[in-house]
Amino acid sequence: MADRQPTSSPASRANRTRALEIALSDENLIPENYVEKYTQIAEHEWDAKNGAMVVAEAWVDPDFHERLRTNATAACAELGFPGPQGEYIVALENTPTLHNVIVCTLCSCTAWPVLGLPPDWYKSFEYRARVVRESRTVLREMGLYLPDEIEIRVWDTTAETRYMVLPCRPKGTEGWAKEALAQLITQDVLIGVALPVI
Ligand code: FE
């Protein structure tokens, strides 16, 4: 039997991206340098370090903490982190008996200005399906063991509402500077699949 070879294979992601860019440009559907500008912003400005600063500020400033709880969009902008996909941010506050975790079951939404673009695993079908049905197991597989007495609440983010997790401040960090506290906050912590560890 003769080998059956595919007559064509999908173009590389880079080539498909370039083709789409050319098609949009030819139709005057994107302003000049639009893609370059957003590539720069995505690489240099949308970063979980921003969310880390937001959490650290909330840990040291009770007034900011309250503003973050009541209007996270404004609170994040106050620290210099506004922007697209951050127009409606909701901070989900953990407590000693409640743990929040974020997913986008539809695709891959995150609050770009404070979480950065989503990691690959966040976009996987497996995470998106399983964290909803068996969150405790999925978190354990990702290295986060939560005892049964801690309730886990899974939040399905959407194009309109973007979440960030506000974790509990770890014991033993009393008196720490904001910058040191922020070092404890990773993108995984802001999504809710990890806890800050000192
Ligand atoms: Fe999405």
Image (tube, grey):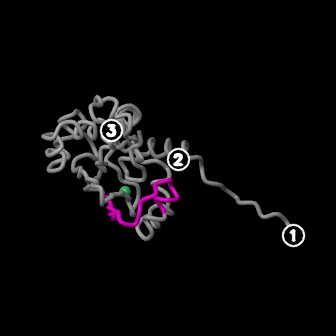
Where is residue 141 drawn, in percent x and y? 52, 59
Q: CA distance from mark 2 to mark 3?
A: 34 Å
Query: Which residue occupies the foreground of this view, 52 or 17?
Result: 52
- Residue depth check, mark 2 versus mark 3: number of the one nearer the observer: 3
Is 16 left or right of 175, judged from the image as shown?
right
Badge number at residue 1 = 1
Number of other residues with Cα within 10 Å of mark 2, as a class: few under 14, some 14 to 19, many 20 or more: few
Look at the picture and state if 90 lies above or below 179: below
Q: Which residues are magenta?
A: 138-158
Q: Disc 2 marks which amino acid?
A: Arg
Badge number at residue 16 = 2
Disc 2 element: helix
Tell me the residue at 18%/50% (across/down): 69
> Which quarter of the figure has residue 176?
top left
Badge number at residue 52 = 3
The answer to whether the residue labelled 1 contacts the one labelled 2, judged by CB atoms less than 8 Å apart, is: no
Q: Decide which of tag 1 and tag 2 comes sooner along the chain.
A: 1
Q: CA distance from mark 1 to mark 2?
A: 34 Å
Given the current orientation, which residue lies at the most extreme front position? 172
Q: Disc 3 marks which amino acid?
A: Ala
Q: Decide which of tag 3 and tag 1 comes sooner along the chain.
A: 1
